[in-house]
Amino acid sequence: MPASIQLLPDLLISQIAAGEVVDRPASVLKELLENALDAGSRSIDIQLEDGGVRLIRVSDDGEGIARDQLALALTRHATSKIGSLVDLERVGTLGFRGEALASVAAVARVTLTSRQRGGEGPAHAWRLAGETGAQPEPAALPAGTVVEMRDLYYNTPARRKFLRSANTEFAHCGETVRRIALAHPEVAFSLSHNGRVNLHLAPADLRARAAVILGDDFLGESRPLDAHAGSLRVFGYCALPAYSRARADAQYCYVNRRFVRDRLLAHALREAYADLLHGSRHPAYCLFVDIDPALVDVNVHPQKTEVRFRDSRAVHQFVFHAVERALASPLSAAPFALPAESPPAIAVAPADEPIGASRVPDPPAMRPWPTGQGALHVGERVGRDDYLAFVRSARSPEPETPACEAAEPLLGYALAQLHGVYVLAQNSQGLVIVDMHAAHERILYEKLKRAFDERQVAAQRLLIPAVFAADPLDVAAAEEHAAALEQLGFDLAPMGPRQLVVRSVPALLTAADPAALARALLGELRENGVSQILTTRQNEFLASLACQGAVRARRLLSLAEMNALLRQMEETERSGHCNHGRPTWMQISMTDLDRQFLRGR
């Protein structure tokens, strides 16, 4: 016989609801901190014991709760934050459901102590234990509220078995505090565990708070961002590819100051970094999206970690383009310093601002390289007069300009090559070291993208066509897709059942091996088809071509060729990193060099 339908007891209802809201101590802490912030707190103190399982005490200096409302605060579906459907559609607070304290009280021992600002009476504060039938008692407390939770899951031992060690639970609590503190830098936070202070944050601005929580390394390797479009704003910091991670553990994204793990925003950010990161690396960022509360639904997840935008496509495109533009800025003149003690780590120069407009005129195109000047390589004896002569010869002819008005290029002028791999240059700050293959790869990639977007892929006919052996499938593919290949800048045709001839290649790639380019192209065709190469996989395909066409290691360059590379780096978006996310250059200042060689001591 089936069981009869009956109403559940209120306690059991609250314990079931607690399963959605309270899955570990960090969940309790999150709810309590959000309540404290909604109450206008400027200082919040958190005390934990045994990872928060034995004790979570949150003290704030907020508005406080009146004596006759203490019991309501522990009642399900009781809240001061919404009163109508209109309020629910424009939620402007962090917490709003009115379930958190009731759910916590159902699975732990809760005590609520509060005093309203400007309260009257002999004690001015009242304490209420979260037990059935309990009445408020007088207590001593400055203005604000103290919520104390003890013995989580004491009455539901089955759930307690799923908790981890105290250290693990405390780690989750610490991360919860950091996430919330990052979004509220104007609020002071103090966190202690088992009587030991673990974190103390004074009120600050966003940059200072990010430096404490995310580290100076993060800020040093990041670009600031602040973009507006109507009521939509995105701001914060995007880390450069050099700061990418093996795991997605440095990604902080907020909507109206609420930490979220939203798939739409994650996709927009991943796409913005697509041209800068190796496939297995994860970007790091701390970004805030501010939007009209009426245009976002925060009530789609029990723990409020997901949101739904009314116009999701517009938000996606806005965030994507804002971050992409921030990361695409030309090179920055700001160098990184070497460590004060030991010299092994040379930091990558970041790229924060476009370089100034005043620089030497643009050099000839990268390829074919300029000729007519002798190369100067490491190992040659060079006197001062020789050096001044080749620096003068590296500059393009220009009218006489007073010395005080001459502007030196950001990357300076080339001095030599090191092992045919690195270009060494001198600028006003000191020594610049450039990975010539990585830098040229980025330059070619950006030019190819622009040419494809504008449908102006210029083809260069080869003086001597390149013939190479190919299997019948490649021959068939070249014959079938001849029109598409021509659109890509290639004239590739069969010379027999097992031979192909390359007569033209894209003009930007004339330095590459034509046969190798053709093989790479045919491999992409066979694996992905023409339609994907021209649409969804276009950037991956162009990156592959750029890698094939970039100048190779061990190739000796003339000074003019080296300087042409430096000038084009200064003009190219994202040139601080190659297509795989590796840095293309670094700066060592004279101060760093003097310190390493103990000059002046």
Image (cartoon, rainbow, N blue to C red):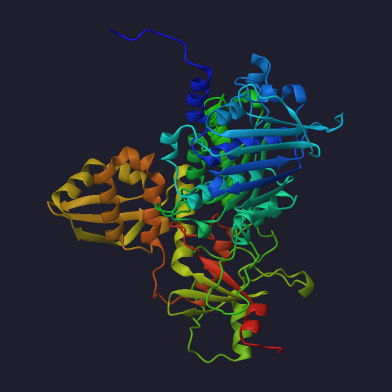
Residue 282 location, x and y as percent?
Answer: 46, 51
The quarter of the displayed image where residue 323 is located: top right
Q: Nearer the viewer, residue 23 or 276?
A: 23
Residue 32 location, x and y as percent?
Answer: 63, 36
The correct choice, above or below, for 75 with respect to 359 in the image is above
- Asked if residue 119 lies left or right of residue 461, the reply is right
- Residue located at (57% from left, 37% from top): 28
The quarter of the displayed image where residue 79 is located: top right
- Asked if residue 61 lies left or right of residue 537, the reply is right
Q: Nearer the viewer, residue 162 or 533?
A: 162
Considering the image in quadrants, where does the N terminus appear? top left
Residue 514 location, x and y as percent?
Answer: 30, 60
Considering the image in quadrants, where does the C terminus appear? bottom right
Q: How many numbered discs sit on the rendered protein?
A: 0
Q: Nearer the viewer, residue 108 or 344?
A: 108
Residue 265 location, x and y as percent?
Answer: 52, 37
- Residue located at (30% from left, 51% from top): 521
